[in-house]
Image (cartoon, rainbow, N blue to C red):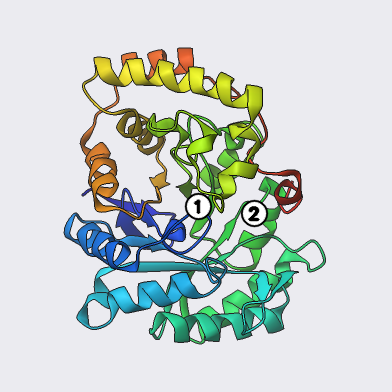
Amino acid sequence: MELRALGSQGLHVGAEGLGLMGMTAFYGATDEAESLATIDRALELGVTLLDTAEGYGPFANERLLGKALAGHRRDRVVVATKTGVEFDDDGTLRGLNGSPDYIHRAADRSLRHLGTDRIDLYYLHRIDPNVPVEESIGAMAELVAAGKVRYLGVSEAAAATIRRAHAVHPLTAVQTEYSLFERGIEGDGVRDVLDELGIGLVAYAPLGRGFLSGAITTPDDFAADDFRRTDPRFQGENFARNLAVVDAVRQLAEAKSVTPSQLALAWVLHQGAVAIPGTKRRRYLEENVAATDIAITAQDLAAIEAVAPRGIASGDRYSPEMMGLLNG
């Protein structure tokens, strides 16, 4: 797999990483054995960036990754995890907390759960409106100085916030939702500030939370505990409108002899992002990784733009409560 510079601070990762969230949370039933086998297969295929967070479980996801990497394989991967959403040690959610004290405590706990002596890429998961971002990033910079963290990033941050954070300590990456269904960063200044400051873009949900795979035909297919049941894009008329877009993308994919997932991922990769599609099964992992070999032509770009221009998706990308946690 192609290695890409993620930002301008010296970190290099495979063009496509692996999002681990669904292996322990939010997407219905889990299967630890299959999840571990999927991580194993990802390493075989050249995936190096493995993305987790203390909140995915909570803690269960970091522990799963620690189990997968136990032994000599730790040095082969870039471990990314996140802080800034507070949990007690028993897993009780307390809400956003970007205070220096919590960040230091959370980092030590993540290191224990991951079974490692350093976090390669540490994100501020959400921006705490009650704590200046300079204080949060300052605490994370102290972790870098202590050798506990190598590189820093933020997730779902506005352009002005990114600029303020970067002034405290250079950011290596900004993680945000980015796909054919979600291109907001192209118009809100985020993409511009990343290019200006030399910060890498890590695209999560590059398949529109599975919608762009073409495999979802009704929200009734979701498990009772699948959070997509509350996602506006999977509700009522929004679902029907978005499904029509997916059908158009499917037709383009068939003409190119690839799957809809592969075309959607190849488009994200063509934009210069590092994509971290999430999956908990080997067969989907293999399909996703194959997208790294797909060339996107000018003709492809024009055809995709015709059926999936910016703003095409119907509905907000999160529930109102979750939208309220985004840094706008």
In the rendered image, the residue lying farthest to the left is 44
Left or right of 134 in this view: 275: left
Residue 89, given in percent of the width and then of the height, sits at 62, 85
Number of numbered discs on residues: 2
Q: According to the image, label 2 marks what residue?
A: 162
Left/right placement of residue 313 relative to residue 50 reads: right
Q: Report the residue marked by disc 1.
A: 199
Given residues 243 and 106, the one toward you in this image is: 243
| Residue at position x 26%, y 56% in the image | 47
Residue placed at 41% from the left, 79% from the top?
114
Establish if 230 lies above or below 257. Answer: below
Q: Which amino acid type corresponds to the residue marked 1 in the rendered image? A: Ile
Q: Quadrant of residue 68?
A: bottom left
Q: Is residue 298 visible?
A: no
Taking the spot 44% from the left edge, 39% from the top edge, the residue there is 210
Mark 1 or mark 2, which has the lower sequence index?
Answer: 2
Tag 2: Cα neighbours inside 10 Å, few (<14), some, or many (≥20)? many
**In the picture provided, is 202 more to the left or to the right than 299?**
right
Circles 1 and 2 in contact, beta carbons < 8 Å = yes
